[in-house]
Amino acid sequence: MKIGVFGGSFNPPHFMHLNIAKSLIENHYVEKVIFVPTGMKYEYKNNLLPNEDRYKMLQLLIKNEKNMDISTNEFQDQVVYTYQTLDYLKEKYPNDEVLFICGTDNLSYLDKWKEAEYLMSHNKFIIIKRDTNPIEPLLEKFKEYKDHFIETNIIPDGMSSTWIREQIKEGKIDSLKEYVPEEIVNYIKENNLYQES
């Protein structure tokens, strides 16, 4: 089985995340998607909600999806890097092929990731195209690893968790049900998340 690993802060998770995972399964790039929310110890994200809240919202996002799961491997007392998570999942699923789902926005600076050479040489990447980062220059940039990159025809919408958080701060949470599942909107409201104190 091919398993796609979908890492991110999911702060909060929204329909674009779900639609990417569904599209990858429906188009047979993978048979299962595992969401891996970033742990709170990750130094480049200083506005993350507690792990438990993001985990619960991801559960609500995928509650009707039998081919999706969540890994809490990065919820540790120290930073857990992508290469370590992929090693862990390959050990956990030794009979399956584990692939990392990566947008071209993240691919553009993959060489700056922790243990980048090891990461790129030991793993395969499913590439999601983002309008801001065309893929051709990136394939040239990382040409020694190009056999590890699987291009997809999936182009997500431009939705971002940052925009959603801004809408909530502006008191527009009830207008978000087009972008965020209603159960997650309700969870955010009930727990007073992302709102200015």
Image: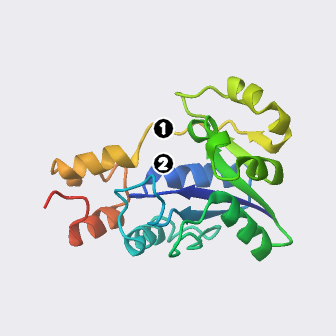
Asked whether the beta carbons under mark 2 and mark 1 sit within 8 Å of each other, the answer is yes
Residue displayed at 76% across by 25% down: 140
CA separation in Å, label 2 and label 1: 7 Å
Can the viewer see residue 59 in this picture?
Answer: yes
Farthest residue in the left direction?
197
Q: In the figure, 166 relative to 155: above or below?
A: below
Quarter where residue 33 is shown:
bottom right
| Quadrant of the drawing holding the C terminus | bottom left
Q: In the figure, 181 relative to 59: above or below?
A: above
Report the colour scheme: rainbow
| Quadrant of the drawing holding the N terminus | bottom right
Residue situated in front as seen by the camera: 46 or 26: 46
Quarter where residue 92 is shown:
bottom right
Residue 132 percent location from the top left of the image: 52, 27
Residue 41 percent location from the top left of the image: 46, 66
Can the viewer see residue 172 in this picture?
Answer: no
Residue situated in front as seen by the camera: 1 or 192: 192
Q: Residues within 10 Å of mark 1 (few under 14, many from 20)?
A: few
Tell me the residue that label 1 is attached to: 157
- The amino acid type of the residue labelled 1 equals Asp
Element carrying mark 1: loop
- The amino acid type of the residue labelled 2 equals Met
